[in-house]
């Protein structure tokens, strides 16, 4: 899988891909992540990528021309399955979306900034708009990092135990059941006996029941 991220502040995006699971996925060659500085496609000697809104109003807007130049250059080199724009009014990211994106080959992620991007970008260049929640960030970079993490960890070979992703919260619209590790007892708090007996059928049934009960209590909307 290849992910190209377009941003005006590339430094924000470097560290998430330099540690832990994402770094290992890149080092194994399971995914390529390329970060593109939009200012490399800017207009004029002042490296301009934004301008004032037509009609007035507070906040600057990313211009269509540098974005168009960057996306067209990438598309001239390979085909892309999706061109994604991170925006608060996009479809809310969930596990189903992450699963579907993990099956793609190449995607572009455009990070908004300031008041967003010229609407013509969204009308003509973007194929999908995604939000990571009902709140506003300073830019789309952190959202892009969240999206990449959610997708990359699902790629075959990224996790040491590939069944781990299949039992995550929100798979099958259920929250994950409680998990325990050593010590067996701590300050009077004990691990449930069913997890200690080695009866894997009973353990699986207990986990399924706990997942359902937790979901019913904490996120009943997932069961609807």
Image: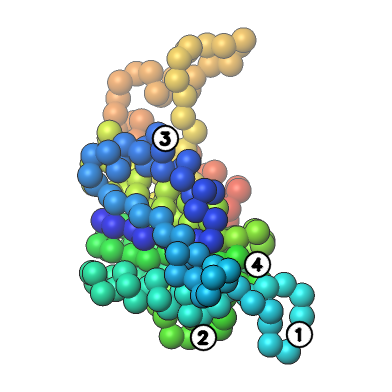
Q: Is residue 129 above or below residue 162?
A: below
> Along the line of sight, which residue is nearer the eye, 83 or 10?
10
User: How much space separates mark 1 and mark 3, taking CA atoms?
Assistant: 43 Å
Q: Do the residues under discs 4 and 3 have CB atoms within 8 angstroms?
A: no
Residue pushed farthest front?
Answer: 45
Answer with left or right where residue 168 lies relative to residue 90.
Answer: left
Q: Position of residue 80 (x, y in %)?
A: 28, 70
The mark that comes first in sequence, 2 or 1, is 1
Q: Position of residue 21 (x, y in %)?
A: 37, 37
**Marks 4, 3: nearer the viewer:** 4
Which residue is found at the position 50% from the left and 64% from the top?
Answer: 39
For disc 3, the marked residue is: 19
For disc 2, the marked residue is: 120
Label 4 packing within 10 angstroms: few (<14), some (14-19), many (20+): some
The mark that comes first in sequence, 3 or 2, is 3
Which residue is found at the position 40% from the left and 76% from the top?
Answer: 69
Q: Is residue 96 visible?
A: no
For disc 1, the marked residue is: 56
> Along the line of sight, which residue is nearer the eye, 155 or 79?
79
User: How much space separates mark 4 and mark 3, taking CA atoms?
Assistant: 28 Å
Image quadrant where residue 157 sits: top left
């Amino acid at each position: 899988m290849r992910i190209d991220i377009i941003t005006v502040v590339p430094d924000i995006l470097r560290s998430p891909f330099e540690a832990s699971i994402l770094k290992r996925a890149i080092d194994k060659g399971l995914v390529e992540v390329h970060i593109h500085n939009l200012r490399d496609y800017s207009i004029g000697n002042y490296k301009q990528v934004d301008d004032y809104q037509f009609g007035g109003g507070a906040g600057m807007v990313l211009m269509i021309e540098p974005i168009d130049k960057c996306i067209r250059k990438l598309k001239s080199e390979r085909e892309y399955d999706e061109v994604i724009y991170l925006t608060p009014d996009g479809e809310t990211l969930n596990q189903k979306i992450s699963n579907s994106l993990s099956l793609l080959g190449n995607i572009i992620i455009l990070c908004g900034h300031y008041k967003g991007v010229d609407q013509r970008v969204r009308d003509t260049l973007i194929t999908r708009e995604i939000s990571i929640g009902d709140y506003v960030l300073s830019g789309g970079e952190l959202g892009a990092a969240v999206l990449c993490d959610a997708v990359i960890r699902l790629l075959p070979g990224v996790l040491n135990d590939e069944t781990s992703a299949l039992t995550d919260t929100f798979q099958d619209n259920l929250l994950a059941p409680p998990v325990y590790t050593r010590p067996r007892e701590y300050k009077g708090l004990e691990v449930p006996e069913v997890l200690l007996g080695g009866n894997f059928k009973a353990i699986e049934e207990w986990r399924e029941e706990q997942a359902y009960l937790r979901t019913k209590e904490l996120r009943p909307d997932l069961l609807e």
